[in-house]
């Protein structure tokens, strides 16, 4: 009997969404499900992932079976739980299995294949034109060489005649790092010791300690020259070992032991009890900003480790990872490891290996941290669970919060969803007893929640000093800075001016690749598209009428900073947005400088609103919230309420009440009123009624199918075909609502047009099953977004 493996080829092609059979040769008998391997496929060498194995007599098969050629790694890359998770992602989010599996990979391909061609001079006739075209000393040609030398027909003929042979070289995309060691061998003869004093000392050190890393020898004061001389004399040898992993946690220090409040104690007791039961449980920890949720997470993680397990702590933004890691490291030291996309590949491989080997047991990170090889995962925490950053905006379009819930079922552990303002869906689940609700309504020091004042920007008396800032906010900022306290100003627009328009003919400067206005970035003196990141020089005149009267309108964070320096000259101001945090660790550095008092006003986008606990912040200004409130999405009210509440929650977290100024043109809106009172219950009561009336989650499931392409007409025709298929296949499903094809709000991005169809229904599983078997899942140019935001 032979052992056959069912593998999936690691190539992101919809047409390869199936398994292929290969024989596992005797020398690779250790291979099993979850291993990455190398296989011959369609005339090439490809990477594959083993999904299952079985015993089979291949002599009875009606088809030939090739052998697996080798293993990519020295260990099984995918655990059974990881494979199970990937299957669920593929099934629920309607993507190919390899798209789901690639989420777990650091290098999307584990091997690098280079194709070249060898010239078979012994087979080429002496009078053949090739001999005059290529010097006979040439033995190898690259693919680029072949394109230069041959037409397609000439190349195909040379291959078929055997004049050229295709070759491949395969190497691993990532090699486990090696470290150079030195070990003693033969003793130094006594007659040589007098003239080799340094070598003698090194030899004595090696005999006392055995083999040591070369870097350790250098630390002890032995130069590389001394070590080489000892090896050349035959008294030591160099060799290489796999390099040990290293901790990225710096000097963590220790926090003073914190006494828990009564609410924190009750929350900890409930979560710890759930951990001890060793089964899936969902718990919503609804605690007001400053109530000490992070300390509860630490105590819950402590229990997970005491049970011999691991704890996963998810945060929505990379910038929040730093603060969370710092807090946990004070308690757990280098038992903490963090994962996010700004780490180098080497750092990500290192941290993954620490989890693989069980060297670190507390894993903190953004949604990519979900894809680690956990061992005995005993707790999952999703902090700020409402945040839209948990949703991936490219295939597969999974939601990290929802995926974490599925993983909690797989690992049979509790999941804690933490937020001051939980998503309406999550709170509805708690209200209907699908998950448990834990509340913490008091701040740690029992400081009152911030005082929020609404300023109606339609009133001219509110804007005497500046059109951007009401007088009340300017007064509050000056008072805060003069009192040696800190302030945060929120505006969810980056850049300087958000629109450039010709005042003569009305022409608006738009990105030629996307149907959006270009944004003026004053620091670079350029116009930039915030969708494709194209950049253009500043225009001197209108391209339509050649007028030089160009209006720079709208405001971004850059303009706010510039105006604040004029209006509050005593302030030291930092900016936290996507532009200012492009470099690695820049977000951490800005927040550290603000925390340490280098700056006393922080201006930023929603990056400033989430979870930061910075001492001394007493004032917050919320600017431009109406833009979010009027976005064309059913989640606009929830997003606006959450942002206001979270921004407000950054202030007054010590023992002194904070103050918030909320600028708006719609002060009467229920979202504004409820957020000013920080009354989540009132907001939820109103919002859940709207959701039920209009048929949105949690009462209906959503699925969006988007067709895209370079030609609008072709995209429109494809969307019409999808719509016709949906109508035909759902004639008997009265509960489904299907919108006709519509242009997306931004219908062109990166020279690509998008036309979508939205489907609503209480149960979309039957439709999903039909879609899996249809052209919708097979054809290119179609995006399926389950649970779109």
Image (cartoon, grey):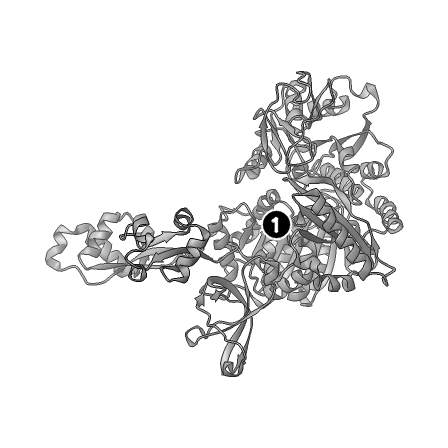
Using the image, determine if residue 580 lies above or below residue 114. above
Residue at horizontal 84 percent and vertical 44 percent from the top: 683
Near-viewer residue (787 or 81): 787
Near-viewer residue (763 or 721): 721
Using the image, determine if residue 355 lies above or below residue 712. below
Q: Which residue is mark 1?
A: 366
- Residue 461's spot in the image, x, y percent? 82, 19
- Left or right, 613 with respect to 336, comes to right
Label 1 CA crowd tier, 10 Å (few <14, some 14–19, many 20+): many
- Secondary element type, mark 1: loop
- Left or right, 201 with respect to 742, comes to left
Near-viewer residue (68 or 553): 68
- Left or right, 710 with respect to 695, comes to left
Q: Quadrant of residue 511?
A: top right
- Residue 187's spot in the image, x, y percent? 18, 62
Residue 137 appears in the rendering = yes
Residue 167 appears in the rendering = no
Q: How many numbered callouts?
A: 1
Residue at the outermost front position: 127
Q: Quadrant of residue 751?
A: top right
- Residue 757's spot in the image, x, y percent? 77, 50
Residue at horizontal 60 percent and vertical 57 percent from the top: 99
Q: Quadrant of residue 667?
A: top right
- Residue 239's spot in the image, x, y percent? 30, 59
Near-viewer residue (648 or 694): 694
């Amino acid at each position: 009997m032979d052992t056959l493996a069912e593998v999936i080829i690691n190539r992101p092609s919809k047409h390869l969404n199936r398994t292929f059979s290969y024989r596992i040769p005797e020398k690779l008998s250790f291979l099993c499900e979850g291993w990455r391997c190398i296989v011959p496929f369609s005339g090439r060498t490809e990477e594959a992932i083993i999904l299952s194995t079985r015993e089979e007599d291949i002599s009875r098969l009606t088809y030939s079976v090739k052998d697996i050629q080798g293993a990519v790694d020295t260990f099984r890359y995918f655990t059974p739980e990881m494979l199970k998770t990937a299957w669920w992602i593929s099934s629920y989010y309607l993507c190919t299995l390899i798209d789901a599996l690639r989420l777990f990979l650091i290098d999307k391909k584990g091997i690098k294949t280079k194709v070249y061609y060898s010239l078979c001079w012994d087979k080429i006739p002496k009078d053949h034109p090739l001999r005059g075209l290529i010097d006979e000393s040439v033995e190898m040609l690259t693919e680029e060489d072949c394109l230069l030398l041959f037409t397609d027909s000439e190349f195909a003929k040379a291959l078929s005649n055997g004049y050229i042979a295709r070759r491949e070289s395969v190497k691993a995309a990532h090699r486990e790092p090696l470290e150079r060691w030195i070990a003693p061998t033969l003793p130094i003869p006594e007659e040589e010791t007098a003239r080799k004093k340094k070598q003698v000392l090194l030899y004595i050190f090696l005999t006392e300690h055995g083999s040591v890393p070369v870097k350790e020898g250098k630390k002890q004061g032995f130069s590389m020259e001394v070590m080489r001389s000892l090896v050349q004399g035959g008294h030591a040898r160099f060799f290489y070992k796999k390099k040990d992993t290293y901790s990225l946690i710096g000097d963590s220090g220790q926090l003073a032991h914190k006494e828990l409040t009564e609410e924190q104690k009750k929350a900890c007791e409930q979560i710890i009890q759930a951990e001890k039961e060793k089964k899936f449980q969902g718990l919503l920890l609804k605690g007001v900003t400053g109530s000490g949720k992070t300390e509860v997470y630490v105590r819950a993680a402590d229990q997970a480790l005491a049970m011999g397990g691991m704890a996963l702590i998810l945060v929505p933004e990379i910038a929040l990872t730093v603060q969370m890691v710092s807090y946990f490291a004070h308690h757990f030291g280098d038992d903490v490891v963090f994962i996010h996309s700004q780490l180098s590949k080497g750092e990500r491989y290192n941290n993954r290996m620490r989890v693989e080997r069980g060297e670190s047991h507390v894993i903190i990170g953004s949604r990519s941290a979900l894809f680690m090889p956990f061992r005995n995962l005993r707790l999952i925490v999703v902090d700020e669970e409402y945040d839209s950053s948990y949703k991936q905006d490219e295939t597969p379009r999974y939601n990290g919060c929802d995926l974490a819930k599925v993983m909690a079922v797989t690992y049979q552990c509790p999941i804690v969803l933490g937020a001051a303002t939980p998503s309406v869906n999550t709170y509805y689940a708690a209200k209907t007893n699908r998950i448990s609700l834990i509340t913490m309504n008091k701040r740690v020091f029992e400081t009152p929640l911030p005082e929020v004042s609404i300023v109606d920007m339609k009133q001219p008396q509110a804007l005497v000093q500046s059109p951007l800032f009401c007088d009340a906010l300017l007064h509050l900022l000056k008072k805060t800075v003069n009192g040696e306290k800190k302030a945060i100003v929120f505006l969810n627009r980056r850049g300087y001016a958000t629109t450039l328009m010709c005042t003569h003919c009305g022409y608006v400067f738009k990105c030629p690749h996307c149907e959006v206005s270009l944004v003026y970035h004053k620091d670079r003196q350029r116009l930039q598209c915030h969708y494709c990141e194209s950049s253009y020089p500043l225009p001197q005149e209108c391209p339509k009428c050649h007028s030089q009267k160009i209006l720079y309108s709208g405001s971004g964070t850059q303009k706010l900073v510039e105006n604040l320096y004029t209006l509050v000259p005593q302030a030291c101001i930092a900016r936290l947005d996507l532009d200012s945090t492009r470099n690695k660790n820049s977000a951490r550095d800005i927040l550290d400088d603000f925390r340490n008092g280098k700056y006393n006003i922080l201006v930023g986008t929603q990056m400033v609103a989430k979870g930061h606990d910075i001492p001394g912040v007493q004032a917050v200004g919320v600017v431009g919230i109406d833009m979010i409130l009027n976005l064309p999405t059913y989640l606009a009210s929830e997003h606006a309420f959450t942002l206001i509440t979270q921004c407000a929650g950054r202030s007054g977290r010590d023992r002194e009440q904070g103050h918030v100024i909320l600028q708006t043109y719609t002060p009467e809106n229920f979202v504004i009123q409820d957020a000013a009172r920080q009354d989540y219950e009132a907001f939820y009561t109103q919002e859940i009624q709207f959701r039920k009336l209009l048929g949105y989650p949690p009462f209906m499931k959503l699925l969006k199918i988007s067709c895209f392409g370079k030609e609008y007409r072709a995209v429109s025709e494809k969307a019409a075909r999808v719509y016709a298929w949906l109508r035909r296949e759902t004639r008997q499903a009265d509960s489904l609502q299907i919108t006709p094809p519509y242009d997306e709000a931004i219908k062109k991005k990166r020279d690509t047009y998008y036309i979508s169809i939205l489907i609503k229904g209480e149960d979309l599983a039957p439709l999903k099953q039909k879609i899996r078997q249809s052209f919708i899942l097979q054809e290119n140019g179609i995006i399926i977004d389950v649970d779109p935001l």
